[in-house]
Each structure stands twice: as C-alpha cells, then as structure tokens.
Amino acid sequence: LRIQIRFATASGNNLYLDNFSLGTWHTSVEEPLADISAFKIYPNPAKNLLNINLSSAQISNFTVTINNLTGQTMLTMPITTHIGINNYQVNTAHLPKGIYFIHLQNDKERLKQKLVID
C-alpha cells in the first residue's frame, strides 16, 4: 500500500509525506490481546485483608507480588485464573503501614497498582 499525503497552507507552504509504510496488525476473537481485562484491589487503604478482583479472558497462571517502595518483595503468591471473574484474598496483617506496589504478572503481561497499608 502506497500513500502520498500533501499538506498546503494558505501562504503556500507545503509538506509532503511520501514512501512510508503502515504495519500489519492481526486480531482475533479466539486470541485476546490480554488475559486480564480488569484488575481491581480493595479496600485501599487495606488493614489485615486485601481483596483482588480480576476479569480474565482465559485460564492463566499468574504471580501476585507485593513490593515496598525500596523494591523489597514482601509477599509472593501464585494464582490460576479462570475464564470470567476471579476473586482472591490476601492476608496483609504482617505488612507494616506504608505504601506498596502490587504486581500481577505472567509471561504475557505485567500489571501494577499502588497499595496503601493502614
């Protein structure tokens, strides 16, 4: 596909774009672009218990990791999602008050949210 675009202003200045190419993207209903379409945590701030709510397009293995602000891993938990809504509970009673990041990761994607422990 070859496209030529010409822009002209009222004062006669011209800009030409020529010989550029557009990439090809393939999408399919059978192959979703992401396993997770929703990743919610609550309550936030949390005290002793954190709820994780995920909406998944397929069965997938993930690792949930909670890191403090220095990057130290405070909790790691493997989970397996099922198609549809998935709910998990995490005991956060052992975490000191502060700001953390919760990561949800597999071999295809990595999602992150800020978490406050009160």
Image (cartoon, rainbow, N blue to C red):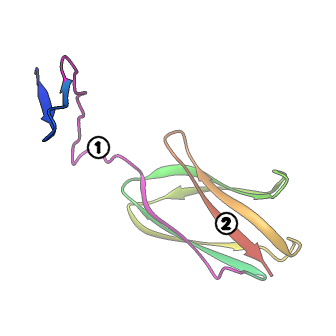
Give the residue at x 36% y 56%: 57
Residue corresponding to mark 2: 114
Q: Nearer the viewer, residue 55 or 46?
A: 46
C-alpha separation, residue under disc 1 versus residue under disc 2: 29 Å
Please provide percent x and percent y for residue 8. 13, 35
In-image side of 68 versus 85 (left or right): right
Residue corresponding to mark 1: 31
Residue 85, image quadrant: bottom left
In-image side of 80 versus 14 (left or right): right
Q: Is residue 23 magenta?
A: yes
Report the magenta residues as a range.
17-45
Residue 18, image quadrant: top left
Q: Nearer the viewer, mark 1 or mark 2?
A: 2
Q: Residue furthest front?
A: 11
Give the residue at x 66% y 79%: 44
Looking at the rendered image, the quarter that the C terminus falls into is bottom right
In-image side of 21 versus 38 (left or right): left
For badge 1, the amino acid type reads: Glu
Q: Earlier in the sequence, mark 1 or mark 2?
A: 1
